[in-house]
Image: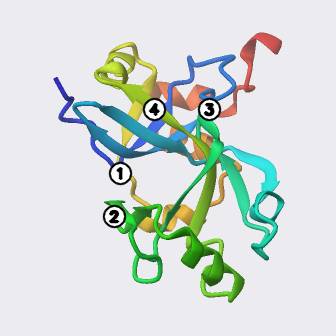
Amino acid sequence: MISEKLKKGHLLIAEPSIIGDLSFNRSVILLADHNKEGSIGFIINKPLKYTINDLIPEIDASFKIYNGGPVEQDNLYFIHNIPELIPNSVEISNGIYWGGDFESTKDLINDGSINKNNIRFFLGYTGWDENQLESEMQGNSWIIADNNYKNKIIGKSTTHFWKEQIIELGGDYLIWSNAPENPYLN
């Protein structure tokens, strides 16, 4: 059974109880697809030490690369908000698109038509098999939130994004907003 609450375009905010998991501790995931076969998302707040130019030298730009998740980390994925420029992209929701013609994308970046507020690159993705995400939701691993940033989330700073989301939740979550990343080391 597919949860009515989950749908592509939502944000999944890691519960503070996820501690010690390098991929998911303090993660915010943009849910890119959710259907009866499973779910796919991209961690949007975990920049890596690489830029697009480090991975693809023919691209003359220093856009950050993000850890999209633990699945297929040797593959590059991207989301963007400019479907009129990048053919064959698929809408996630709220004006956010996934993928598209990569050769065109490279040319558009090199000629300055695409900037860091238009596109975000990921190594890997986050994936769940059928009913796996629902099971994690029942286990209180994730908090579902609307993406109030719409397609502007692509250019959103990520340094404190998880903390900002936790503060917005308020209530019992506020105590976690200033807790160390690993409370056991405190």
Measure how far apart labels 1 and 2 are at the Cα level: 7 Å
Of circles 3 and 2, the one toward us is: 2
Helix, strand or loop at disc 4? strand
Measure how far apart labels 3 and 1 are at the Cα level: 19 Å
Helix, strand or loop at disc 1? loop
Residue 94: numbered disc: 2
Q: Residue at x 22, y 31 (%)?
A: 36
Measure how far apart labels 4 and 2 are at the Cα level: 21 Å
Which x, y percent locates residue 127? Answer: 45, 32
Instruction: Place residue 20 in its image quadrant.
Output: top right
Instruction: Report which residue position mark 1 lands on.
Output: 9
Disc 4 marks which amino acid? Gly
Of circles 1 and 4, the one toward us is: 4
Discs 4, 3 touching: Cβ within 8 Å: no
Q: Residues within 10 Å of mark 3 (few under 14, many from 20)?
A: many
Is residue 55 found left or right of 166 in the rendered image?
A: right
Above or below, 17 relative to 41: above
Instruction: Place residue 154 in its image quadrant.
Output: bottom right
Q: Residues within 10 Å of mark 1 (few under 14, many from 20)?
A: many
Above or below, 171 relative to 135: below
Marked residue nearer the N-terminal end (1 or 4): 1
Discs 1, 2 touching: Cβ within 8 Å: yes
Helix, strand or loop at disc 2? loop
Instruction: Report which residue position mark 3 lands on.
Output: 26
| Depth check, front residue: 27 or 8 | 8
| Depth check, front residue: 1 or 15 | 1
Instruction: Report which residue position mark 4 lands on.
Output: 127
